[in-house]
Image: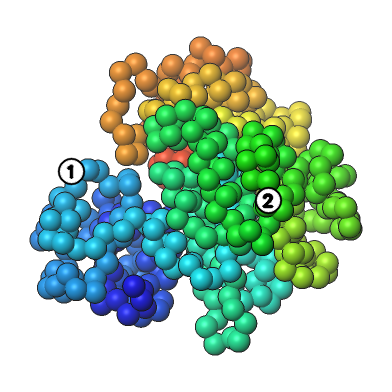
């Protein structure tokens, strides 16, 4: 199938971060794009402003007539977040339209392109955007499909220049959810982490590890794997003996960081590999975990021949990804950070980094659990990681694609949290409570709709109301 010659493409769940990147790609190359999503969001509003027609009613009548005129040369892209009983999806299936998952279409787009694929239960969005930025900043012809909105480009899609002679490099976020990353064709693979997650899909941690090994085994035999050291221990290099594999991490690895200096406006560190070192690098986004992400990105940039000076300048100009350790408000006595963390290990990494920056300040964490199954499966881990904060405020679980599970709620995490202060609050009561208690260092954490509280909190901190 020649994707560039399609009559039109219809997206079911177009407001998803990964879906919207592919929608933008089709729109950019001139293929008419339409879409459905359950509710409007800032992302769907942006797509509409760019000229993409979106509807929010799950009915056949809401599908544009132009798309329904024929099944010929038309493609429907869907996300597993769409319910099985979705009216539009089932109608399009019954009428014989070609339906492909987002991951399959991403595999089709990138097939034949030199691909850097970034996988991992945590860190893949930041790492893939950092790889893309370092390469683009150095003048490489790249495209990137990302799982977040980069602050540098204000987009989840970076487009290559088709007018240039050299073949483009494509950087893709390789998502383990629903085994999506198994549709890709990597020349270079990065694995940032491999912790149990998505057990509703994989059943248990062992099957998730098998999924990661299968992804790694898709890497071109002449390519390379760069893998975080703890992930390598879990995945065991004997499962991919013929692939050139290099570990990186914050400890005594082949590729490592030394002389790390934490700060709210960024971290400084030395990059060290067996052949060279780059000293006093500045990474403008905080976090020990982001130093690890930078190690992978720098190593990939070096493998493409990017010069040391360009890496230094590119890293210093990197502004991160929205909702990844995003410093919203920063004054002497009041700091507000927003983060997408939704797994115990992510929360642990976030809070450890914040504690390193503010060892003597009170840290208040507001956390919205994401998914009933994830809350059930990792309840103890959530409680332990949240205990790194001085005060924990829990919001009720964001269900996303799931129905409630008996006995699974935010309150079940309270008993295991050892922080001095802890409670469950409604979203409506949160801001009045914060205005009353005036936290020193405040974090909003989660992958649900907690982001809708960010602006009201920021406005209060800035304007006092």
Q: Is 64 situated above or below 56?
A: below
Q: Is 82 situated above or below 394?
A: below
Q: Label 1 neighbourhood size at 10 Å, few (<14), some (14-19), many (20+)?
A: few
Q: Residue 22 falls in which quadrant of the image?
A: bottom left
Q: Position of residue 112 (x, y in %)?
A: 51, 71
Q: Position of residue 131 (x, y in %)?
A: 65, 61
Q: Residue 304 falls in which quadrant of the image?
A: bottom right
Rendered image: mark on residue 56: none
Colour scheme used in the picture? rainbow
Question: Element type at marker 2?
Answer: loop
Quadrant for the N terminus in the image: bottom left
Q: Label 2 neighbourhood size at 10 Å, few (<14), some (14-19), many (20+)?
A: few
Question: Residue sitting at 32 percent across and 39 percent down?
Answer: 401
Q: Is 11 situated above or below 368?
A: below
Q: Which residue is mark 2?
A: 242
Question: Element type at marker 1?
Answer: loop
Rendered image: mark on residue 85: 1
Along the line of sight, the residue nearer the viewer: 327 or 240: 240
Q: Position of residue 443 (x, y in %)?
A: 58, 36
Q: Specify whether 209 is left or right of 280.
A: left
Q: CA distance from mark 1 to mark 2?
A: 45 Å
Question: Residue sitting at 48 percent across and 67 percent down?
Answer: 111
Q: Position of residue 18 (x, y in %)?
A: 43, 56
């Amino acid at each position: 199938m020649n994707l560039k010659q399609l009559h039109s493409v219809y997206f079911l769940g177009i407001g998803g971060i990964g879906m919207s990147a592919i929608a933008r790609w089709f729109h950019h190359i001139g293929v008419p794009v339409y879409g459905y999503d359950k509710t409007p969001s800032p992302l769907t509003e942006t797509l509409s402003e760019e000229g993409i027609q979106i509807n929010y009613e799950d009915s056949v009548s809401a599908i544009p007539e132009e798309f329904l005129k024929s099944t010929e040369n038309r493609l429907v892209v869907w996300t597993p977040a769409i319910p099985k009983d979705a009216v539009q999806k089932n109608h399009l299936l019954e009428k014989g339209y070609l339906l492909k998952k987002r991951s399959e279409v991403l595999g089709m787009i990138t097939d034949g392109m030199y691909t850097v694929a970034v996988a991992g239960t945590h860190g893949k969005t930041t790492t893939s955007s950092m790889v893309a930025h370092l390469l683009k900043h150095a003048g490489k012809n790249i495209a990137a499909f990302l799982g977040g909105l980069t602050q540098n480009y204000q987009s989840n899609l970076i487009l290559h220049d088709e007018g240039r002679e050299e073949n483009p490099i494509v950087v893709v976020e390789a998502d383990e959810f629903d085994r999506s990353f198994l549709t890709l064709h990597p020349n270079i693979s990065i694995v940032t982490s491999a912790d149990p997650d998505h057990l509703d899909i994989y059943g248990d941690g062992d099957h998730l590890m098998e999924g990661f090994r299968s992804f790694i085994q898709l890497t071109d035999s002449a390519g390379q794997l760069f893998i975080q050291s703890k992930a390598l221990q879990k995945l065991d290099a004997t499962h991919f003996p013929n692939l050139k594999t290099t570990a990186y991490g914050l400890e005594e690895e082949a590729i490592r960081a030394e002389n790390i200096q934490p700060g709210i406006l960024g971290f400084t560190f030395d990059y060290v590999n067996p052949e060279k070192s780059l000293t006093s690098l500045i990474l403008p986004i905080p976090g020990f975990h982001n130093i690890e992400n930078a190690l992978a990105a720098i190593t990939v940039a070096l493998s493409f021949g990017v010069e040391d000076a360009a890496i230094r300048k590119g890293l210093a100009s990197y502004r991160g990804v929205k909702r990844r350790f995003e410093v919203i408000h920063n004054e002497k006595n009041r700091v507000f950070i927003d983060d997408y963390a939704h797994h115990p290990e992510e929360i642990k990494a976030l809070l450890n980094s914040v504690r390193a920056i503010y060892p003597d300040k009170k840290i208040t964490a507001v956390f919205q659990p994401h998914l009933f199954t994830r809350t059930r499966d990792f309840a103890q881990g959530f409680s332990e990681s949240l205990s790194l904060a001085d005060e924990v405020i829990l919001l009720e679980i964001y269900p996303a694609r799931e129905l409630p599970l008996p006995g699974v709620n935010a309150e079940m995490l309270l008993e295991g949290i050892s922080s001095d202060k802890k409670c469950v609050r409604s979203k409506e009561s949160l801001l009045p409570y914060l205005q009353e208690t005036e936290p020193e260092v405040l974090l909003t954490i989660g992958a649900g709709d907690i982001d809708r509280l960010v602006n009201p909190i920021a406005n209060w901190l800035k304007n006092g109301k």
